Amino acid sequence: MTIQRLLVYIVFFLIPFHLVGKELTPIQKNYSLPKLHPEKVHTVSSKRITSRLLNDHFKKINLNDSFSNKILENYLEILDFNKNTLTEVDVKNIKFKWGNKLDEQLKVGQTQAAYDIFNKVLELKYQRYEYAKSLLNKKMNFYENDYIILDRHKLDWSKNKQELDDLWLKKVKFDELNLILSNEPDDNIKKP
């Protein structure tokens, strides 16, 4: 495991999951997503982890803008591994806003970037969920010559929302076809 991945896992990936174990309300029509915010303990943890990695790791680490961008790329890969939520524009905006700032933030124990990015991706995932749910009411045409790439992590980000919509239409269509082929009752196929 590379140092960048280790930093991402510890500082940016584990911290937003402080909600684990807390009960979340089921998704309803007027549901508002939880907004995660850093807590004081995260500042101390981030400072300590960063200090230990910079001072005590066997490999010398230069925490600079280049390293900062690598950390961000790894974090985005973790949050949207199959590249089915973020668009190219979303990624560019996140990189523009945070790409060269993570190194400074880590040094002083700031974790706001991790939370802002996490909340943005969570919001976009919810929008994708709502879109997929809306497709359940459509009659699918299985006579088209469609194909879907299920393992997309090595592909480029979708260029725009239209490409994402097309991808999600294919995903829902693929799932529906699999349920039909497994003799699932029609009522179960259209359930979200």
Image (cartoon, rainbow, N blue to C red):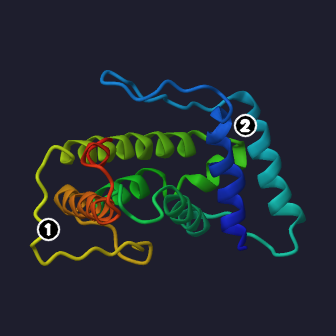
Count the marks: how many?
2
Q: Is residue 77 above or below residue 145?
A: above
Q: Which of the 4 quarters of the picture holds residue 184?
A: bottom left
Query: Quick one: 188 or 150, which is closer to the camera?
Result: 188
Q: Mark 1 or mark 2: which is in front?
A: 1
Q: 106 left or right of 78?
A: right
Q: 171 left or right of 19?
A: left
Compute the Cα span from label 1 to label 2.
Answer: 52 Å
Identify residue type, mark 1. Answer: Phe
Residue 82 horizontal/vertical position (percent): 43, 66
Residue 21 horizontal/vertical position (percent): 68, 32
Asked if residue 22 shows in the view, the reply is yes
* Residue 43, numbered circle: 2
Query: Quick one: 99 or 4, which is closer to the camera?
Result: 4
Identify residue type, mark 2. Answer: Thr
- SS under mark 1: loop
Residue located beneath label 1 in the image: 142
Q: Is residue 190 above or below residue 77?
A: above
